[in-house]
Amino acid sequence: MPRLADVSDLMEHLDVQGDEALLERLLDAAEVVAERYARRRFSPDPVDTTGPGIPKTFALTRNKSSLRVPDLRVVTSIVIDGALISDDDYRLSYGASTEPATHIYLRSGSYLYSWNGYADARITITGHWGFNPTPPDVIHAVLSSAARAYRMRDASYGDSVVVEGGGNLNYVRQLSEEAKAILDSYRVPNFAFA
């Protein structure tokens, strides 16, 4: 089910009244594509931002002091192989001050350096994840992508369709340049420095 926008937003964006089930599927697909493309979580997890945090467990590679985390907003606790670490033992790294954290760095002297360095560790982070609120430009990119998919049906899966009043609409079978530009600004590289 779509989380970033709703079907009424898409209908308004398209200026149509249509099959709500179809529009919901298109909107849901556009959200998934946006999040996979940017490698970000654009909606809050859990949805109830006042409730308890959600635990997520990751493998912490030996001899590494950093870990990519999926948009961490609020830390409730961090446990490495069963040992609770303090707030002084880590720092979070942000893409921008208004975004959730994308990396966690363990400080020297933390539990990381007293653990058995010959094996990977399990790190469990309990907290609130994802953007809250979703940035307006991301919502626009998702609505535009869903609207594009809706209009592609009129093109009979061709690359061009003639529109009423003359002219052509051209379609490319990928994200639009506008959506890519918006999502690229949130994209996190696939690497981190130790």
Image (spheres, rainbow, N blue to C red):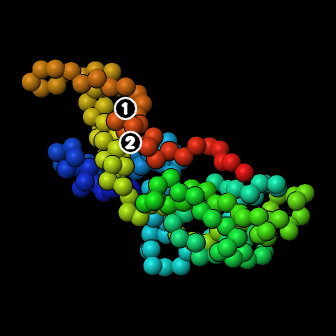
Q: Is residue 147 left or right of residue 32?
A: left
- Mark on residue 53? none
| Placement of 39 over or under 100, stated as above or below | above
Name the image quarter holding residue 118.
bottom right
Instruction: Say which residue appears at 67% left-offset and 60% top-offset.
Output: 105
Residue drawn at 36 percent across, 46 percent down: 142
For residue 25, side relative to residue 188 (left or right)? left
Give left or right: position of 106 versus 148: right
Amino acid type, residue under disc 2 in the picture: Ile
The spot of residue 44 in percent (x, y) is 45, 64
Furthest toward the front, the residue is 108
Q: Is residue 103 above or below residue 173?
A: below
Helix, strand or loop status at disc 1:
helix
Q: Secondary structure at mark 2?
A: helix
Look at the picture and state if 170 lies above or below 86: above
The residue at 21%/43% (across/down) is 14
Kindly report the distance in space between the C-alpha atoms of the residues bearing marks 2 and 1: 9 Å
* Number of other residues with Cα within 10 Å of mark 1, as a class: few under 14, some 14 to 19, many 20 or more: few
Marks 2 and 1: CB-CB under 8 Å? no
The residue to which callout 2 is attached is: 182
Q: Position of residue 121 (x, y in %)?
A: 80, 62
Residue 86 or residue 46, whichever sits in front = 86
Q: Position of residue 155 (x, y in %)?
A: 28, 26
Query: Quarter holding the N terminus?
Result: bottom left
Kind of residue indicated by mark 1 = Glu
- Which of the labelled discs sits on residue 177, or is there none? 1
Residue drawn where x is 34% and y is 36% of the image: 178
For mark 2, does the 10 Å Cα neighbourhood hold few (<14), some (14 to 19), or many (20 or more) residues? some
Image location of residue 132, percent across then percent down: 41, 64
Residue 47, located in which quarter of the rendered image?
Answer: bottom left
